C-alpha cells in the first residue's frame, strides 16, 4: 500500500532503488570513469514506477539485484585512485559532477528513501507490508 497517492509503497521503493542503481548510478559511474566529460541523462523515477508497474511484481528479485549491483559498484569505488574521484561529466538537471559528487548524490538519494521507508515501517498501516525490511 501507498501511504498517499504521490508516495511509494515499500515494494515500489525496492524496485525504484534497484532501477536507479542499475540504470542510473552504476551507468553514470562507469561512464564517468571510461569517458571524457560524458553527458549523463536524468531518470524519471515516478515514470519508471508507473511504466514498470512495481507493485505488480514481487520485491525479492529486485532486492537481490540491488544488492548485487551495489556490491559491484562499491568494489569499483574501493579501487579508485585520487584522480578517478575527480573525473567529471554533466548530469542533467544537476550540472557538472565529479565521481565524488556522484557518490554524495547517490548517498542522499538512498538516505531519502530510507527515511521514507522508516516512516512507512512505523505507521499503523505500514507495519505489515514493511515487516520484511
Image: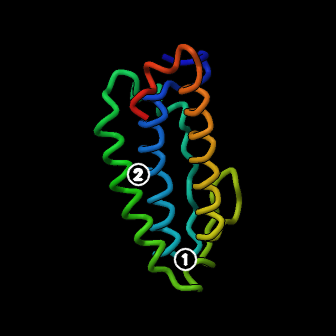
Viewer-side residue, 25 vs 14 = 14
Mark 2 vs 1, N-terminal side: 2
- Asked if labels 1 and 2 touch by Cβ distance under 8 angstroms, the answer is no
Viewer-side residue, 34 vs 76 = 76
| Disc 2: CA contacts within 10 A as few (<14), some (14-19) or many (>=20) | some
SS at circle 2: helix
Q: Which of the labelled discs sits on residue 36, or is there none?
A: 1
Question: Which percent across, then down, holds residue 1?
Answer: 48, 16
Q: Which residue does the image show at 44% across and 80% down from the upper left?
A: 79
Q: Which of the labelled discs sits on residue 22, or is there none?
A: 2
Question: Which percent across, then down, holds residue 111?
Answer: 61, 46
| Disc 1: CA contacts within 10 A as few (<14), some (14-19) or many (>=20) | few
The answer to whether 48 is drawn above or below residue 86 in the figure is above
Question: Which percent across, then down, holds residue 90?
Answer: 64, 63
Q: Answer left or right for 65 relative to 123.
A: left
Q: Quadrant of residue 51?
A: top left
Q: Which of the labelled discs sits on residue 55, or is there none?
A: none
Amino acid at each position: 500500500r501507498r501511504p498517499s497517492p504521490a508516495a511509494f509503497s515499500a515494494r515500489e521503493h525496492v524496485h525504484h532503488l534497484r532501477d536507479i542503481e542499475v540504470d542510473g548510478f552504476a551507468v553514470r559511474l562507469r561512464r564517468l570513469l571510461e569517458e571524457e566529460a560524458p553527458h549523463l541523462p536524468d531518470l524519471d523515477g515516478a515514470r519508471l514506477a508507473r511504466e514498470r508497474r512495481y507493485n505488480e511484481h514481487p520485491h525479492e528479485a529486485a532486492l537481490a539485484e540491488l544488492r548485487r549491483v551495489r556490491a559491484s559498484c562499491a568494489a569499483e569505488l574501493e579501487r579508485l585512485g585520487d584522480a578517478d574521484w575527480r573525473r567529471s561529466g554533466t548530469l542533467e538537471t544537476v550540472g557538472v559532477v565529479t565521481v565524488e559528487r556522484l557518490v554524495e548524490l547517490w548517498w542522499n538519494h538512498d538516505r531519502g528513501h530510507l527515511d521514507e521507508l522508516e516512516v512507512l515501517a512505523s505507521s499503523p498501516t505500514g507495519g505489515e507490508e514493511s515487516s520484511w525490511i
